[in-house]
Amino acid sequence: MTEEAPTSPRRNFYGRIKGKTLRASQKSYLEEDLGPLTLHGVTRDENPSRALVPLEPWRAQRPLWLEVGFGGGEHLIHQAAQNPSVALLGAEPFVNGIAMLLGKVRAQNVTNLRLHPGDVRDLFEVLPEGSLTKVFLNYPDPWPKARHHRRRFVTQEYLIPLARLCAPGAEFRVASDIPDYIRQAREEIPLAGFTLTADTDAPWEDWFSTRYEQKALREDRTPHYLTWRR
Ligand SMILES: C[S@@+](CC[C@H](N)C(=O)[O-])C[C@H]1O[C@@H](n2cnc3c(N)ncnc32)[C@H](O)[C@@H]1O
């Protein structure tokens, strides 16, 4: 495993894929643990025909949840540890974040988690329709400049494929500290077939505050939490 991106981005929807130099321990997590924890058959190289990816036997018929852009993985590992009867997928192209999550997986020894170390849109192409029952989008990249707003996750380009993967009644959670992002989410997400069920400054009961949220709080930005039903 090198520090290069495991898959190549198609369009600049995310920022960095590599940050600070990895520690020796993080390099070993990537070398030893990323392969076994990766959901195989997702990349275009592995699956050029974009056939549906086999989820069994790992999924073991469990409900399937997805976290988009898990960052350092603190929320994803929390959900995995709290919900052993669920199978969780996480997508994240940022190599340092992936290495951080792998360290946490080692420490907590969870087995109900698989990763796609790349763009979540790769997953959208190869997961079965209606297969997801919960989706987390925590602190998506804000893309503050107006001319970049179309790169935000809360646009139809991303929401329509996501909605197709969501089972009827699936929950879609969005956390953000950027008022204009919340505005766009309120406008765009219903157009993709989701209904707003909660819109609040109070986090979910099973929430685990992420690194990005901690930074927002230190910088006096107010977290906001939206819940949608498919
Ligand atoms: C602002 S960070 C938030 C990270 C984390 N969710 C948190 O709350 O700390 C946004 C994350 O989304 C990831 N991301 C952006 N575009 C993505 C994509 N197309 N697929 C998967 N992850 C993506 C970025 O690499 C980054 O780690």
Image: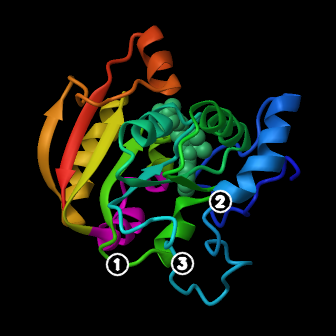
Q: Amino acid at mark 3?
A: Val
Q: Give the labeled residue for mark 2.
A: 38
In space, the residues marked 1 and 3 are separated at their CA atoms by: 12 Å
Identify the residue at horizontal 77%, vertical 41% (top origin).
Answer: 29
SS for dot 3: loop
Nearer the observer: mark 1 or 2; the answer is: 2
Neighbor class of circle 3 (other Cα within 10 Å; few <14, some 14-19, many 20+) is some
Q: Position of residue 26 (x, y in %)?
A: 79, 34
Identify the residue at horizontal 71%, vertical 38% (top origin).
Answer: 99
Q: Position of residue 226 (x, y in %)?
A: 23, 39
Residue 28 painted magenta: no
Q: Is residue 77 visible?
A: yes
- Which stretch did the figure color magenta? 150-166
Nearer the observer: mark 1 or 3; the answer is: 3
In space, the residues marked 1 and 2 are separated at their CA atoms by: 21 Å
Residue situated in front as seen by the camera: 203 or 148: 203
Q: Amino acid at mark 1?
A: Glu
Q: Which sits earlier in the primary sequence, circle 2 or circle 3?
A: 2
Q: Give the labeled residue for mark 3.
A: 53
Q: Quadrant of residue 37?
A: bottom right
Q: Position of residue 83 (x, y in %)?
A: 36, 43
Viewport quadrant of the C terminus:
bottom left
Q: Give the labeled residue for mark 1.
A: 129
